[in-house]
Image (cartoon, rainbow, N blue to C red):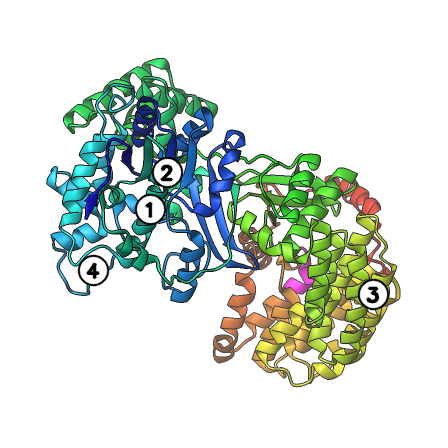
Amino acid sequence: MGRVDTDRVHVLGVRHHGPGSARAVRAALEGLRPDAVLIEGPPEADALTRLVPGLEPPVALLAYTPGDTERAAFWPFAEFSPEWVALEYAARTGAEVRFCDLPAAHSLAADAARGPGGGPGAGGMPEEVDSSDGPERVRPAGGAPGAAERARVDPLGVLAEAAGYDDPERWWDDVVEQRPESGAAIGAPSPFPAIAEAMAAVRAELSPGPDPHEARREAHMRRVLRSALRAGHERIAVVCGAWHVPALLEHPRVADDDALLRGLPKVKVAATWIPWTHGRLAAGSGYLAGVRSPGWYHHLFTAPDRPVERWLAEAARLLREKDHPVSSAHVIEAVRLTGALAALRGRPLAGLAELAEATSAVLCEGSAERAGPVHREMAIGERMGSVPDSTPMVPLRSDLAAQQRRLRLKPDPVAHDLDLDLREESARTRSALLHRLRLIGVAWGEPRRGPTRSQGTFREAWTLAWAPELDLALIEAGRWGGTVAGAAAARARDLAARAPLPELTALTEACLKAGLDDAVDDVLARLAVRAAEDDDIEHLMDAVPPLARSARYGDVRRTGSAALGRVAGQLMARVCAGLGPALSGLGDDAAAHVVSGIDGVHGAAVLLGGAAEADWLDALGSVAVRDDVPGRVCGRAHRILYDSGRLDDATVAVRLGLATSRAAPPERAAAWIEGFLSGSGLLLVHDEALLALVDGWLTGLSPEAFTDVLPLLRRTFGAFEAPERRAVGDRVRHRETGAPVPAAGGAALDAGRAAPALATAALVLGAVPRGAGGAR
């Protein structure tokens, strides 16, 4: 075994994403002035190094197998990553730069061969393992972690333990990352000889030897290094994980390395740069080489001086933005506290733990609740990088980037809300883009439920958050087309070819929202065929609401809806005809599902209006009085007919009395009440006659019957809002005493004073007396 010529080769062992390591690398490169720089990374990305001047970190190299994005890996770089510093140096000085790790073509092929759970690349989108910590190993079950085993799992842990630390991260921070003077300037003591010596000592404890995959990686690094030496470079700098330094300084025979690399599996690989985020650099995201606090590391690397003082001043600014009173005196005292804590703990510089304690104790006056959100925000320091337009991209990604610029929708890793008024052309275009992306599996936007700042059918609410994985999703979706619109239309047609009836109607709605008019026609044609073949009433009921909503969206989005209305009307006619036969003999669980379907179809009928709504109410009227229909369905049908003005108070009172009479089984009566009252307790609050009927039925039950129906009643009344339950209780209590029911403010309702307001509301709503047959 030979040793490398250290006059020509300088191996700089680093920890990935370490600000101290990055400063030391920058100082070492400026002092060495190498004419070639070798960096741990996939050689497939060598041609991409020309793009470094136009990149804004954090970014990542993405290597993937075209046509099979399950095989993909990321190599992230932050501004404080030593490898990024080396890339910038080479770009600035013109030094030749090459990546020297095992090619991704072999790594991805090996991951696929291991199968699910077999390695870092199995089952999704792996990031690079932190090789400065050594190979990952699993300790045998029941075995005690000896020195050699600890070295396999965490070599930094062995060194930290020898130095008297119980936390390897803290030890590395103290000796390397948080010592700004260590290797920070030309001529300052370099940490790299000590790192190489320490890692050699730890690796010497390994038995029987390094992991086979790590051995192959190091063999390829030596192969690239030999190639650079043969090319005649006089000074070569190698920037790699500290774990690999001894393997690059001690060279085995070329034949031994060739034997390790011979016959490795291989797949076709493409590579590109993509934007990355600090959140995905954090260890909490699952990234094996992640750091605890990327925001703190970025601050350490970029702060020109006094990092502690600048950090606490920024924390104070953020707290003041949240309306917390923080003065300059608070900051001064917080700085003093961090210095005292660091001295007590023997640290060269206050770390994140000391800063967190000072923020809570001084800036927030002991309130951890106030300090926590600000400290977490700063510790992550969320930011997103960018790549130039000249970066190799699939056509679909380029089209999306152009649309993002045109629509002023900047990708942001921090989730934020977007409310759209669909009456505006720009809002409709934005909405269509977000819906098209969802169709092709790129979930940049998530529809937001709940209230928006302005209510109405013209409003659409989204929550947007860009994640690096979406770039991979775009690559995968590229097989459907080169533009977002073309890919979404092709994907919709593919889904329509095999989707069942309910999914087809939902797909129709999605296509309409996405503005895919041609695809809508194709999906509707497929839907008509499926509807003619499907005689399942539940499938038909599930299919109607999305179509009715689509017809409404057609009006809002200024697209044609006549064909949608026709198909929806045909399905509604089949539902009305098949409703009666389908309801006979249903069990309780099936009845619950049918009630949900009835609610959906009724909403669709109201949207369609005209003959469709009239036919639907006629169908409900025919099943509402049948004894062979479950009580819950009958109750719900009566409630819809009552709300629609088809039944007046007197008729409902009579039917409720019959349904809850002693002749009716208590279980059916309770189910009838549940169906009638489900969704809102306001009906009982405002309708004294119905409340009296329900109260009379309940008080007239025998103890045994009441026990039988209690679970159903609890389910019914438990679904009401708490204010509704209180109001119903007040109504019942005051009925017994005869006293007036107090209003919300505690005073009794003055009917005379309320009459003008009620008359105005009735005029606005077009309401007529219940017995006149009009709408409520």
Mark in front: 4 vs 1: 1
> Quarter of the image holding residue 261?
bottom left
Mark in front: 1 vs 3: 1
| Secondary structure category for the residue under label 2 | strand
Q: Earlier in the sequence, mark 1 or mark 2?
A: 2
| Secondary structure category for the residue under label 4 | loop
Q: Residue at x 74, y 79 (%)?
A: 534
How far from the left and from the top, in percent, is residue 575? 77, 75
Bounds of the magenta segment? 685-692
The residue that mark 2 highlights is 38
Q: Is the C-beta separation of discs 2 and 4 under 8 Å?
A: no
In three-dimensional space, the C-alpha distance between marks 2 and 4, rounded to whole angstroms, equals: 33 Å
Tell me the quadrant of the picture where the C terminus can be found. bottom right
| Secondary structure category for the residue under label 1 | helix
In three-dimensional space, the C-alpha distance between marks 3 and 4, rounded to whole angstroms, equals: 68 Å
The residue that mark 4 highlights is 139
The residue that mark 3 highlights is 613
- In the image, what residue type sits under mark 4? Arg
